[in-house]
Image (cartoon, rainbow, N blue to C red):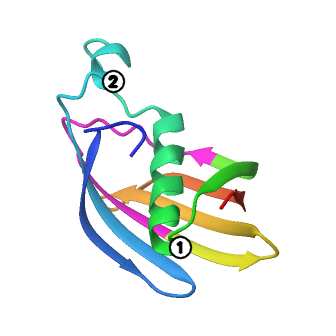
């Protein structure tokens, strides 16, 4: 985990095509004190890192973000109001590359949609 203590993985399921994970954000993590004071929101780059880490866990491989063809931030994630997130990742792996499509949500709200390609680095 690159950002130690930012989240806890509460449920994780993976098969050959899909990952379903539930995470709980640590509202007291230092990252939220700076982003933004008095109005904490989850940084988009941290969400992308979490998606990468979950994909690495499912594949048991290290990945490097090669291309992000579509990123849509559709709702703010406030760790004090909505600390529990569901992350769905569908993926295909071919020729040392992993293509993913992600939807991250809380309650009934989609917060992030991401399409990206990762290069396998080991």
Sequence-wise, the earlier of marks 2 and 1 is: 2
Q: Which residues are magenta?
A: 72-88
Give how far across and how far down residue 108 sits, in percent: 33, 62
Which label is found at residue 106? none
Give the image quarter of residue 91.
bottom right
Residue 74 in view (yes/no): no
Q: What's the residue at 18%, 35% (across, down)?
A: 80
Q: Secondary structure at mark 2?
A: helix
- Mark 2: give few (<14), some (14-19) or many (20+) Cα within 10 Å: some
Asked if residue 78 lies in the magenta stretch, the reply is: yes
In the rendered image, the residue lying farthest to the right is: 95
Height in image: 79 above or below 105?
A: above
Q: What's the residue at 63%, 66% (across, down)?
A: 101
Give how far across and how far down residue 77 sits, in percent: 36, 40
Residue 79 in view (yes/no): yes
| Depth order, front residue of 41/2 | 2
Q: Secondary structure at mark 1?
A: helix
Screen quadrant of the C terminus: bottom right
Give how far across and how far down residue 100 sits, in percent: 65, 67
Height in image: 37 above or below 105?
A: above
Which residue position holds label 1?
59
Rounded to the nearest angstrom, the CA distance separating label 2 from label 1 is 28 Å
Give how far across and how far down residue 85 sits, in percent: 31, 56
Q: What's the residue at 45%, 50% (across, down)?
A: 50
Which residue position holds label 2?
31
| Depth order, front residue of 119/70 | 119
Q: What's the residue at 39%, 57% (across, down)?
A: 105
């Amino acid at each position: 985990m690159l950002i130690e203590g930012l989240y806890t993985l509460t449920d994780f399921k993976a098969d050959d095509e899909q990952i379903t994970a539930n995470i709980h954000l640590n509202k007291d993590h230092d990252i939220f004190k700076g982003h933004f004071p008095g109005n904490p929101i989850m940084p988009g780059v941290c969400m992308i890192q979490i998606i990468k880490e979950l994909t690495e866990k499912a594949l048991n491989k290290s990945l490097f973000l090669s291309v992000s063809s579509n990123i849509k931030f559709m709702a703010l994630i406030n760790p004090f109001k909505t600390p529990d997130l569901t992350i769905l990742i569908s993926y295909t792996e071919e020729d040392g590359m992993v293509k993913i499509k992600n939807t991250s949500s809380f309650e009934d709200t989609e917060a992030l949609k991401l399409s990206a390609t990762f290069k396998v680095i080991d």
